[in-house]
Image (cartoon, coloured by chain):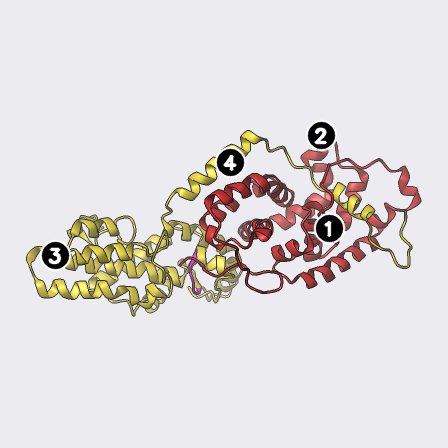
Chain colours: A yellow, B red
Amino acid sequence: MAPAKSSPRWSNVHSEEVREAAYEVPGFDAAQQDELWRRVELKASTPMRRRVGWRGVVAGVVVVGAIGVAGAAAADVFIAHTGKGPTDAEDIELGGPGERLNPAAPDFAAVLKRATNDIPFPSTLSRDSALLWEVEDLSDEEDTLVSTGALRLWTAGHALCSWSNEWAVALGTEDTRTQERAASVILGARNWPSIKDTDADMADESEASWVPVLERAIRAEDPTEAKAALEGQACMPGLAPELGLGKRW
Amino acid sequence: MHARARPRTGTGEAVVTSGPASRADVEALYRRHAGELRGYLYRRAGETGADLLEDVFVIAIKRVEELPAPDLHRAWLFGTARRLLLAADRETFQRQCAESERARLDGLTTETAQSGPSVRARAVRQALASLKEEDRELIRLTEWEQLTIIEAAMVLGIRSGTARVRLHRARRSLLAHPAFHDLFAPAAKTLEAPVTKGGRVGRGAS
């Protein structure tokens, strides 16, 4: 059965030999299959806090970036820019678009500020508070890279939260001019590049799926619905106290 | 933010679906393919890999609208499993090392602790370990996982023609490897008989 030394040819005998060398796999009985399917259904039907999901996956990217980060650190040029982007469509889906930034780098706050300077906030204070919160929040996570797209979308969320607070205050005080201005900004937010470029769909369980809900609340002049749209999605603590979304930290 | 791009075939052409799949379709896929996918994941990365099976089908449910044509569902599932393995790879850098170690130190596996792989199996694994990763994976996908060439090409994201060439090259390399070659020499008949695994036959590469 030995192949001719000069021109061996692959045959079913060789295939069989390779197949026989496959590693043994432990059994997977019907009960185990049913149990796993139950977990699949549960996991698939649980609305994810996409921010958390993004972060989990983005954290997984870190090892790829870690070499560069470590190398850069060794060279004393430890910076937020990594030059690394998503590797494929799935990476974009799970981690967000754009360059992966390193929040542990000393220049991260400055890079974040530059990356989000086109996002309108009602005040410098609200912008600074939002950006500072992001920097502090992300610094808690070791070995994490975060996409620029994700950061811009989160910052846009903070901005809309701030504008919603402005709107709610104006609604309560019958300051029609301020109310209309804030409403105009909120209703135009779906065209912000920070939202549109990252989540044009704004539907289902996507990152900015709460935006249309907020729009409906603004049009209906319903602060309760506005709070419901923002709660757990966009607001950092303290940006929308008028809506009851936590005190300033 | 949902990726809307449809999966692509090995020929680089967009897959045309015959109609949107449903959640029930995914469950049917699970019932049909969960066992073999788990085998694939386990063979590549042990228990840690097998744990990824859950994520494969969660992704399938969440992306049910993006599933390719039914005849490519199996390849899509294996491709998703492979991407999850690669992602896990990026996190740990351990799979390839572990795999190489496994091939080198067969004696330390659970399998070995119980019965031990046959001398012949060890020879095959040694020969496989000598191949380039992409060639080795083609061999394993077509022989261990019994994927067709078209399916394997889709899993690896290459054209089927390219896959055929690579598979041919990989087989020649295996045949030329001394450990594999010696299995078919007359003296090899004295080696212990291979352990039967009961692998399916008939869907292998042509």
Q: Which mark is residue A169?
A: 3
**Element on which disc 4 rests:** helix
Question: Is residue A69 shown above or below B42?
Answer: below
| Residues in magenta, as a range | A95-99
Residue named by callout 2: B114
Tag 1–tag 3 contact (CB < 8 Å): no
- Label 1 is placed on what type of residue? Ala
Mark 1 Cα shell of 10 Å, populated few (<14), some (14-19), many (≥20): some
Are the numbered discs 1 and 2 placed on the same chain, yes or no? Answer: yes
Q: Nearer the viewer, mark 4 or mark 3?
A: 4
**Dominant SS type (magenta):** loop
- State the CA–CA distance, disc 1 to disc 3: 68 Å
Residue named by callout 4: A36
Q: Residue at x 51, y 53 (%)?
A: B67
> Along the line of sight, which residue is nearer the eye, A56 or A94?
A94
Q: Residue at x 76, y 46 (%)?
A: A18
Residue named by callout 1: B129
- State the CA–CA distance, disc 4 to disc 3: 49 Å
Mark 2 Cα shell of 10 Å, populated few (<14), some (14-19), many (≥20): few
Could you tell whether B177 is left or right of B11 in the image? right
Residue B72 in the image: x percent, y percent? 59, 53
Q: Residue at x 65, y 57 (%)?
A: B153
